[in-house]
Image (cartoon, rainbow, N blue to C red):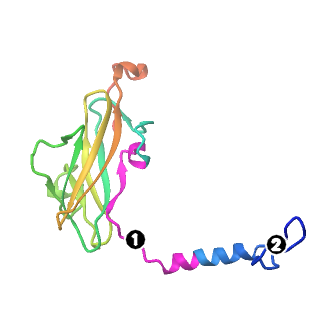
Amino acid sequence: MRRNDGSDVAGSGSRPGASLLLWSIAVCATLLVTPPSHARGVTQLMPDSALFDNGAPFPVRAQFLPDQPFDLVAVVQPGPGRTIEHFEFYVDGRPTLAAAEPRRAVRGDCATIAGREHVAPCTIMPENAHAPTVLMHAQYAHREPGVHVFKVVAWQDDGARISASGNFEIVDRAFVPALAGSTIPRN
C-alpha cells in the first residue's frame, strides 16, 4: 500500500487486499479451533421482550387481552455437566402458581405429561445434558391491564440459580374499539 507521497507503508506488502485475506484466514482459524461455549444462562424468553433482549423496558413487544391465555417459555442452558432440577415463573414478583415450592423439572412433552393437555408448568428435558432445556408455563393468563414483568428462575442440580426477566402488556379492552364486547381471541 502506498501513501499519498508515493512511499510504501511499512509492513503492508505490495499486494492490495493481502491484509484482508490474512485477517479472514485468522478469523476462520479461530472459529474452527475455539470450542463451543457451554456457558449457563437463559438463551431465549417468550413472549418476545426488548427487556430480555437488551434491557430496555420499551417497546413492549407482546400484548394480550385480559384473561387471554399465552405461554411463558424459557430456553435455559445449564452449566457444563449440569441439569435443571426445578424452576418457577414469576409475574410482578409473584409466582404464577399458588404452590409455594418451585416446580420439579420433569422429562416429557408438555402435551402428554400426566395424560393431560397443557399441564402448567411443564418442561421439555433434552436427552443430552449439554443441550438447552425448555421450561414452560402453558396457558398462563393475566387479568390486570398494564405492563407486567415476568421472570423465570431455574435451579441447577448443584444449587446454582439461573434467571432472566422480560415483559408483556395486558391491553384494556376499552382501548381497543374493534374488540369491545367481542370474545377473547385464542392463540
Quarter of the rendering occupied by the C terminus: top left
Judge depth for marks 1 and 2 and give the one in front: 2
Figure quadrant of residue 105: bottom left
| Residue nearer the viewer, 177 or 2 | 2
Based on the picture, tell me whether residue 2 belongs to the magenta stretch: no
- Write down the quadrant of residue 29 in the picture: bottom right
Dot 1 alpha-carbon crowd within 10 angstroms: few under 14, some 14 to 19, many 20 or more? few
* Residue type of the residue flagged with mark 2: Met
94 lies above or below 183: below
Which quadrant is the N terminus positioned in? bottom right
Q: Looking at the picture, how far across and down is residue 64, in whole percent?
A: 35, 33
Q: In this view, does 164 lie above or below 13?
A: above
**Would residue 138 be visible to someone looking at this image?**
yes
Q: Residue 37 carries which label?
A: 1
Q: Position of residue 53 (x, y in %)?
A: 42, 49
Q: Which residue lies furthest to the left in this view?
A: 100
Circle 1/circle 2 CB separation < 8 Å: no
Q: Where is residue 129 in the image (x, y as percent from the top left)?
A: 27, 72
User: Which label was assigned to residue 1?
Assistant: 2
Image position of 36 (left or right of 95): right
* Residue at screen point 25% across, 34% down: 142
Q: What stretch is highlighted in magenta?
A: 28-53
Q: In this view, does 159 lie to the left or right of 5?
A: left
Q: Where is residue 178 in the image (x, y as percent from the top left)?
A: 43, 21
Marker count (numbered): 2
Left or right for 19, reference 119: right
